[in-house]
Image (spheres, rainbow, N blue to C red):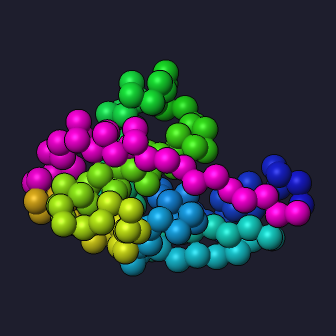
């Protein structure tokens, strides 16, 4: 299967792609409203909840807009390099969790993205109310783990 055909099939199979798919695939988070599936030899993650998906899209946009200068991203509407997207997703979620649960170990994976966003909205009244300056510190300091090459 060539890459173009794979992408077309992926979009047909996964109509509501999980916004935090990269974070889930790296094992740094999980979500009660997502499900994994396999297509060819790859794994994808889909979102089961339309409201949850809209909230995640909004949060991703806010994380990108607030971290773009710190990460040297010239345009926030363009696709990001894999490592920068991982830093935004993983660092952003960890930073938000740290704001809510200051006693939690910063490197512990996020157990439920949906619940984290729901708690964040309850605590800050909206996703816009998050103190992003503090979250951006986590994004900037997040280190992407290097993949081990198989021989």
- Image-quadrant location for residue 11: bottom right
Q: Is residue 126 above or below residue 37?
A: above
Q: Looking at this view, is 144 or 4 the one in front?
A: 144
Q: Identify the residue at horizontal 58%, vertical 43% (top origin).
A: 83
- Disc count in the image? 0
**Whole-percent x, y for residue 132 in the image:** 24, 40
Q: Quadrant of the C terminus?
A: bottom right
Q: Residue furthest top?
A: 74
The percent position of residue 128, horizontal first and vertical second, equals: 19, 43
What residue appears at the point 43 percent right and 54 percent down from the top-left corner?
A: 90
The percent position of residue 16, horizontal first and vertical second, equals 52, 63
Question: Left of 92 or right of it: where is 120?
Answer: left
Rendering quarter of residue 150 = bottom right
Quadrant where the image shows the N terminus? bottom right
Answer left or right for 72 relative to 149. left
Q: Quadrant of residue 102?
A: bottom left
What range is drawn magenta here? 124-151
Along the line of sight, the residue nearer the viewer: 39 or 71? 71
Left or right: residue 11 compared with residue 23 = right
The residue at 38%/68% (across/down) is 108
Q: Is residue 26 above or below residue 38?
A: above
| Residue 130, image x, y percentages | 18, 46
């Amino acid at each position: 299967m060539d890459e173009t055909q794979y992408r077309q099939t992926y979009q047909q199979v996964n109509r509501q792609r999980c916004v935090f798919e990269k974070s889930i695939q790296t094992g740094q988070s999980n979500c009660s409203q997502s499900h994994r599936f396999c297509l060819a030899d790859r794994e994808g993650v889909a979102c089961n909840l339309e409201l949850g998906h809209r909230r995640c899209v909004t949060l991703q946009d806010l994380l990108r807009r607030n971290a773009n200068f710190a990460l040297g991203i010239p345009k926030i509407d363009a696709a990001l390099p894999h490592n920068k997207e991982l830093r935004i997703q993983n660092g952003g979620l960890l930073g938000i969790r740290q704001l809510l649960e200051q006693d939690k170990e910063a490197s512990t994976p996020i157990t439920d993205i949906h619940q984290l966003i729901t708690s964040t909205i309850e605590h800050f009244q909206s996703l816009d109310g998050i103190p992003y300056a503090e979250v951006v510190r986590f994004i900037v300091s997040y280190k992407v783990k290097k993949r081990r090459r198989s021989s």
